[in-house]
Image (spheres, rainbow, N blue to C red):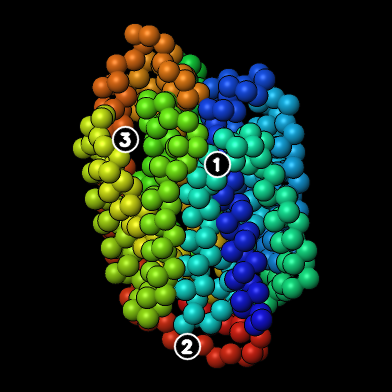
């Protein structure tokens, strides 16, 4: 097998695994809250958020360390940490311990995901890069969607602990294979360091913002929660200022002077805000309102997953031939239309009608992702692809976290706290505590906000590159390193 296909296969497994676990817990969450001793609805929310938060916080750091010490070395370490974290999650005795073990998983996911795109970009020539990145990115994000289905099936048949078992044999195999077969194409950067100030401000700001949003949604708003949100936003603003002053910034601001990269990461951020909670809202609707079991919920979400998986690789292939702009714009428009349709559907909508926006949302995401990632990664010099991949993945994760926070904030404003806690746990709300119309109204408001953000994505998406990539000289028939600058 040519080296580039070894890279693609292994990194695709890594991307699939790391984002599978971002969502596989989601559909199983009500069962975990009900059966795991000492687990409250707030603990349940942080079982989800802790994984995504630590991944978002560490992605840029891992991208920087990969540029300094070698991408493959840290990528291999990611598989080891992720596999160990999965094993620990499967034996967690209570909710707090499970949150801690999810943090370990998140560290491994950050090591894997921050290096995936950079390793692929190093291994493939420009004329094949879009298709390769498309397969990898679609595999990763479809992993997060397929996780909803797999979580439902496994939890129903084998119990919720089984959702972590499936990572163990795959993780061991991928770790050994990566160690034996992968190698760094570009030499590590010398003489640069890690941005401790930036990392600290970013981690503290993002954590405080999410703590304030989730505590306010579950326990009711108070001055403490408002203060946490304000302080978190202030620290994030200070982080943005500090990155223009430190010697070796965590977020390389020079990359944002490259217009295709700036357009791509901005579109990535806005797209993830608009799409990051579609599946979460549907899970709450199916389990917390319609009271379907976990298996039925997973099956009902299959059209959403299938549309994404089908459209993603096709979009990546054609974007290599015709350029990414048209596909990024088309995917965004389709996603926006789907969100508008969601916002108009009544509480008692037949599933045959509900499936239409589900398919459109999945297709729109699949069409958007690969061309956008190909454009932004192809725009940066080879030596900066590690940090560029970290920036892109970080903004995607931050967008997903903000989308989740938006869900909790909007529902908290329209649904009584007692009823909201029951819905998060997949239980019927207490008698008289919830008027179904108030929950549906909250859903409609959420989808309208997400649709507005989605259509806002059209501005940066329309600024991505239009030219077909030029073939690059192949210096090594196996590796095909392309050192051309942006």
The secondary element bearing badge 3 is classed as helix
- Above or below 481: residue 197: above
Residue 32's disc is none
- Above or below 68: residue 431: above
Of discs 2 and 1, which sits in the foreground? 1
Of discs 2 and 3, which sits in the foreground? 3
Per the model, the C-alpha gap separating discs 2 and 1 is 45 Å
Q: Which residue is mark 1?
A: 153
Q: Which residue is mark 2?
A: 471
Per the model, the C-alpha gap separating discs 2 and 3 is 44 Å
| Residue 269 picture location, percent across and down | 42, 51
Of discs 1 and 3, which sits in the foreground? 1
Q: Residue at x 53, y 82 (%)?
A: 125
Please identify the quadrant where the N terminus is shown: bottom right
Q: Nearer the viewer, residue 125 or 155?
A: 155
| Residue 281 picture location, percent across and down | 39, 35
Q: Image check: 28 left or right of 442?
A: right
Q: Residue at x 74, y 67 (%)?
A: 177
Q: Earlier in the sequence, mark 2 or mark 3?
A: 3
Is disc 2 surrounded by few (<14), some (14 to 19) or many (20+) residues within 10 Å?
A: few
Can you see residue 204?
no
Q: Are marks 2 and 3 in contact (CB under 8 Å)?
A: no
| Res 473 quadrant in image | bottom right
| Res 354 quadrant in image | top left
Q: Which residue is mark 3?
A: 446
Q: Earlier in the sequence, mark 2 or mark 1?
A: 1
Q: Image check: 306 left or right of 113?
A: left
């Amino acid at each position: 097998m040519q080296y580039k296909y070894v890279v693609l296969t292994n990194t695709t497994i890594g991307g699939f695994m790391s984002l599978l676990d971002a969502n596989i817990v989601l559909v199983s969450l009500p069962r975990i809250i009900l059966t795991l001793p000492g687990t409250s609805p707030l603990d349940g929310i942080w079982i989800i958020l802790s994984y995504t938060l630590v991944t978002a916080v560490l992605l840029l750091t891992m991208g920087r360390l990969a540029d300094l010490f070698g991408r493959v070395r840290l990528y291999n370490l990611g598989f080891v940490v992720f596999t160990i974290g999965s094993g620990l999650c499967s034996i967690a005795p209570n909710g707090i311990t499970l949150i801690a073990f999810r943090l370990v998983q998140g560290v491994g996911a950050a090591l894997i995901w921050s290096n995936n795109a950079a390793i692929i970009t190093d291994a493939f020539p420009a004329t094949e890069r879009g298709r390769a990145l498309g397969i990898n990115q679609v595999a990763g994000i479809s992993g997060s969607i397929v996780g909803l289905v797999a979580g439902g099936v496994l939890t129903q048949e084998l119990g919720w602990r089984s959702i972590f078992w499936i990572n163990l044999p795959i993780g061991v195999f991928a770790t050994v294979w990566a160690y034996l077969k992968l190698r760094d194409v570009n030499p590590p950067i010398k003489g640069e360091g890690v941005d401790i100030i930036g990392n600290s401000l970013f981690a503290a700001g993002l954590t405080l913002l999410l703590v304030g949003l989730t505590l306010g949604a579950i326990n009711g708003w108070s001055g403490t929660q408002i203060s946490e949100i304000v302080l978190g936003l202030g620290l994030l603003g200070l982080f943005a200022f500090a990155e223009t002053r430190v010697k070796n910034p965590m977020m390389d601001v020079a990359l944002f002077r490259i217009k295709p990269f700036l357009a791509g990461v901005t579109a990535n951020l806005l797209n993830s805000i608009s799409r990051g909670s579609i599946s979460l809202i549907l899970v709450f609707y199916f389990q917390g309102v319609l009271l379907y079991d976990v298996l039925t919920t997973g099956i009902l979400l299959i059209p959403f997953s299938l549309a994404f998986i089908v459209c993603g690789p096709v979009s990546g292939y054609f974007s290599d031939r015709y350029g990414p702009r048209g596909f990024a714009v088309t995917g965004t428009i389709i996603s926006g239309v789907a969100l508008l349709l969601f916002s108009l559907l009544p509480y008692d909508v037949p599933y045959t009608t509900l499936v239409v926006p589900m398919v459109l949302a999945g297709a729109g995401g699949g069409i958007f992702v690969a061309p956008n990632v190909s454009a932004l990664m192809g725009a940066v010099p080879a030596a900066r692809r590690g940090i560029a991949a970290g920036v892109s993945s970080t903004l995607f994760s931050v967008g997903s976290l903000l989308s989740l926070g938006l869900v909790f904030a909007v529902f908290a404003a329209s649904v009584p706290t007692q009823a909201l806690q029951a819905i998060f746990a997949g239980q019927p709300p207490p008698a008289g505590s919830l008027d179904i119309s108030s929950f549906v109204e909250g859903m409609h408001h959420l989808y309208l906000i997400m649709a507005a953000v989605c259509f806002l994505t059209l501005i940066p998406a329309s600024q991505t590159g239009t030219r077909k990539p030029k073939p690059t000289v192949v210096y090594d028939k196996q590796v095909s390193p392309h050192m051309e600058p942006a």
